[in-house]
Image (cartoon, helix red, strand yellow):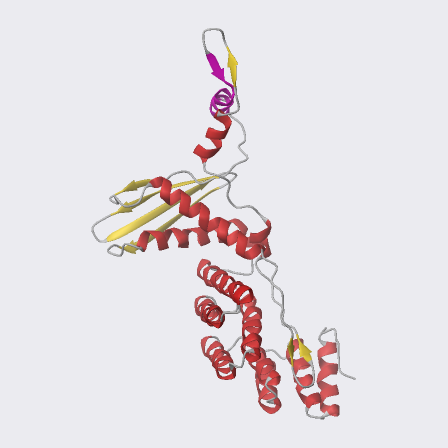
Amino acid sequence: MVLPFEVSGNKNLSGIAIADQLTAELTQIQRIHGIKYEGITLRTNRSSFTPTFSTENALGNREMVVPKAETVEFGMGEIGSIDTGSGSLSIGRLIIAFQNLIPGPRSITTIRGSLQRYESSIVLVALLEGDKVQSWIITRPSGNDDQPSEMIRSLAFMIALEQQQSELSAKTWEGLKYYTEALDSYHRYQLTGDPSFLYLAGNKSLETIRSEKGYKNIYDLLLSIESNGIMIGKKNDVLEYCNKTIELDPIYPYGWTNKGTSLYNLGKYDEAIEAYDEAIKLDPKFAIAWNSKGNSLYSQGKTTEARTAFNKSKELGFKGPYPH
């Protein structure tokens, strides 16, 4: 549970407000990663293609926060009372008192902290107490009224990452933050069909790659974003995303396979093969790149060369289907 923070030097923000926002941010992270995102099938003149991607399921499957302490205690206090003749004794309050007096293991992890504003900086400190103790500190220049709110948001992603790090693909809180924002924008696009959300999802995806290199989840999401862009006729925007992705991380093979797949879906088979070859240069054992190259060769009618590429992908563990 998130307890009210101590606040000093900031009249516009209370400790309860900080706890409320942090609770809301953690709940939102859980919600976004708990959504089941459906792939949209892209149909070309020769095939159909449904890109898929995974969220950080560990975040969506576990409740990270419970109501704040005062909410829980208020509920306990309202359980009822015992008539003592001269008055009454609250059962809930009695239970709370025993919980506070009797030592023993606590099943609920608490987060407390402070926000301090100095002349030139704002410092947000948080302490997590439970089975293990962890702490975080964020320092930012003062002067921006929105700064505390953004600091609290960053803190939420730090906590989310630390609590599930062994089960997450993300290695940095910044990467997790931008990836979560990209997922949320993509989901809004699926709900509304508004292209502005698709653009936002693409831009947040690029920010993810800029923040964390080699994060595979974002490339899977980008492939879905690019495929949707092709469906709504945004070919130039899709190719721009492909090129920017490679500029940001030129040695990660998934960027090249994404570009190859987008080119393939646009019917640009020669260019697609060039992109797949770049991926294979970076990782000769990249089975997906070999299979995708085989599809492009097969679409050109080069069945012998395609079969060679398919066989190589099989050797490396790729499991069909293959064209016949």
Is residue 151 left or right of 48 when viewed as pictured? left
Foreground: 278 or 229? 229
In front here: 289 or 203? 203
Considering the whole magenta stretch, tell me its main secondary structure: helix
Q: Is residue 110 left or right of residue 298?
A: left
Queried whether the magenta region covers residue 174, the answer comes back as: no
Give the vertical position of 135 relative to 90 (above or below).
below
Residue 227 picture location, percent across and down: 58, 76
Q: Which quadrant would residue 305 be assigned to in this image? A: bottom right
Percent x, y of residue 155: 41, 51
Whether residue 279 is visible: no
Of all residues shown, which one is farthest toward the right? Answer: 324
Can the viewer see residue 151 in this picture? yes
Quadrant the C terminus occupies: bottom right
Tag count in the figure? 0
Q: Position of residue 100 (x, y in %)?
A: 47, 25
Q: Considering only vertical position in the picture, is 249 above or below 55? A: below
Q: Residue at x 22, y 53 (%)?
A: 120
Image coords of residue 153 (percent x, y) = 40, 53
Residue furthest to the top: 85
Residue at x 44% of width, y 61% of height: 174
Specify the segment rendered in magenta.
88-101
